[in-house]
């Protein structure tokens, strides 16, 4: 990473961890997942409202944890809100690849999430970055009701 990119990374991560977007309770009917990352102590409560066609109509979260887990969750909600289900799944897979594989040219559609690519070198940090996405993956799988997920299970 060059210095300019590193600075941008710091700014974006700090900004999102200090002022997370879509942070707060989601009222009404929603699919709810509690996610835990015991190795770092990160926690997320993710709430997703799926439309009749499976689109992500609304998504919000609460919780606490390190800057990376919070920033990743905040950036994720911005990316997923309003997406058709298929696009949301594509985004989930693209982000997982980004932080676990060598992706020379990350897809543009990931936007600022591409700044998290550097965590790939640190397995513990990958869990922090993936926590919100694991919770979303679980929400997609269960579609309704409440569930839990832990980064230690897979
Ligand atoms: Zn963490």
Image (spheres, rainbow, N blue to C red):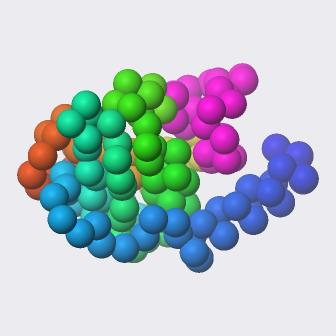
Q: Position of residue 99 (x, y in %)?
A: 55, 37
Tell me which residue sits at (52%, 66%) in the image: 21
Q: Position of residue 61 (x, y in %)?
A: 36, 64
Q: Position of residue 105 (x, y in %)?
A: 72, 24
For the question of whether residue 44 can be seen, the reply is no
| Residue 82 sits in quarter | top left
Image quadrant holding the N terminus, namely top right
Q: Nearer the viewer, residue 32 or 131?
A: 32
Residue most toward the left? 145
Q: Residue 115: within the magenta?
A: yes
Tell me which residue sits at (16%, 40%) in the image: 143
Q: Position of residue 126 (x, y in %)?
A: 49, 46
Is 144 placed left or right of 37 in the picture? left
Is 38 placed left or right of 124 in the picture? left
Q: Nearer the viewer, residue 122 or 89?
A: 89
Q: Residue 57: within the magenta?
A: no
Q: Main secondary structure of the magenta part?
A: helix
The residue stretch that appears in magenta: 92-118
Is 27 placed left or right of 112 in the picture? left
Q: Nearer the viewer, residue 42 or 82?
A: 82
Tell me which residue sits at (27%, 58%) in the image: 47
- Tally of numbered discs: 0
For the question of whether residue 29 can be seen, the reply is yes
Image quadrant holding the C terminus, namely top left
| Residue 13 sits in quarter | bottom right
């Amino acid at each position: 990473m060059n210095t300019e990119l590193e600075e941008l990374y710091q700014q974006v991560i700090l900004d999102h961890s200090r002022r997370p977007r879509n942070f707060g309770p989601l009222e009404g009917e929603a699919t709810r997942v509690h996610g835990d990352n015991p190795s770092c102590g990160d926690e997320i409560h993710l709430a997703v409202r799926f439309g009749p066609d499976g689109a992500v109509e609304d998504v919000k979260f609460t919780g606490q944890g390190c800057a990376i887990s919070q920033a990743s969750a905040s950036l994720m909600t911005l990316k997923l809100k309003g997406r058709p289900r298929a696009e949301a799944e594509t985004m989930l897979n693209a982000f997982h690849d980004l932080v676990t594989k060598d992706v020379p040219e990350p897809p543009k559609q990931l936007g600022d999430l591409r700044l998290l690519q550097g965590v790939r070198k640190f397995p513990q940090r990958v869990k922090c970055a993936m926590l919100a996405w694991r919770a979303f993956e679980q929400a997609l799988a269960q579609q309704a009701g409440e569930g839990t997920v832990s980064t230690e299970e897979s």
